[in-house]
Image (cartoon, helix red, strand yellow):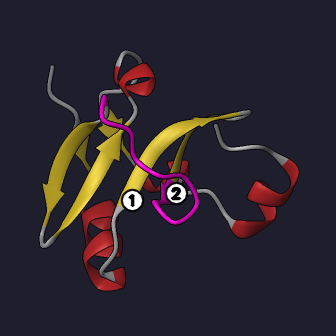
């Protein structure tokens, strides 16, 4: 199973110079920095430049692409827990 990562997501990760994770939130898959939600041993790891995009094993069953519409804003994290 291969999960594609859109170029704009790759650019975001490389420009910010930090790792990100796709995890589960109340609205579906959420793309958040690992400072918001730490990676787990079971995560799928995708290298992006010098950084890593972690994909929750739970979300990996349902997604085939990581897109910018998965990016969680700070306002959303206040109202919806990121699991």
Q: Horizontally, is 10 left or right of 73 in the view?
A: left
Q: Main secondary structure of the magenta part?
A: loop
The residue identified by callout 1 is 20
The image position of residue 70, as x and y in percent, is: 52, 48
Depth check, front residue: 77 or 64: 77
Q: Residue furthest toward the front? A: 41
State the residue at coordinates (25%, 48%). 5
Quadrant including the C terminus: top right
Residue 35 magenta = yes
Q: Is mark 1 on a helix, strand or loop?
A: strand
Q: Residue furthest toward the right? A: 79
The image position of residue 12, as x and y in percent, is: 35, 73
Label 1–label 2 contact, CB within 8 A:
yes
Stretch of the chain drawn in magenta: 32-42
Q: Horizontally, is 65 left or right of 83 in the view?
A: left
Q: Could you give the CA–CA distance between mark 1 and mark 2, rounded to whole angstroms?
A: 6 Å
- The answer to whether 71 is drawn above or below residue 49 in the figure is above
The image position of residue 24, as x and y in percent, is: 58, 33
State the residue at coordinates (34%, 74%). 18
State the residue at coordinates (28%, 53%). 53
- Which of the labelled discs sits on residue 32, or is there none? 2
Q: Horizontally, is 27 left or right of 60 in the view?
A: right
The image position of residue 10, as x and y in percent, is: 25, 65
- Which of the labelled discs sits on residue 60, or is there none? none
Q: Is mark 2 on a helix, strand or loop?
A: strand
Residue 58 magenta = no
State the residue at coordinates (23%, 58%). 52
């Amino acid at each position: 199973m291969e999960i594609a990562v859109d170029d704009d997501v790759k650019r975001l990760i490389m420009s910010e110079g930090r790792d990100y994770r796709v995890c589960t939130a109340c609205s579906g898959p959420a793309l958040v920095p690992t400072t918001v939600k730490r990676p787990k041993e079971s995560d799928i790891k995708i290298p992006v430049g010098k950084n890593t995009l972690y994909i929750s094993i739970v979300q990996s069953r349902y997604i085939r692409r990581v897109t910018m519409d998965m990016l969680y804003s700070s306002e959303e994290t206040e109202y919806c827990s990121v699991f």
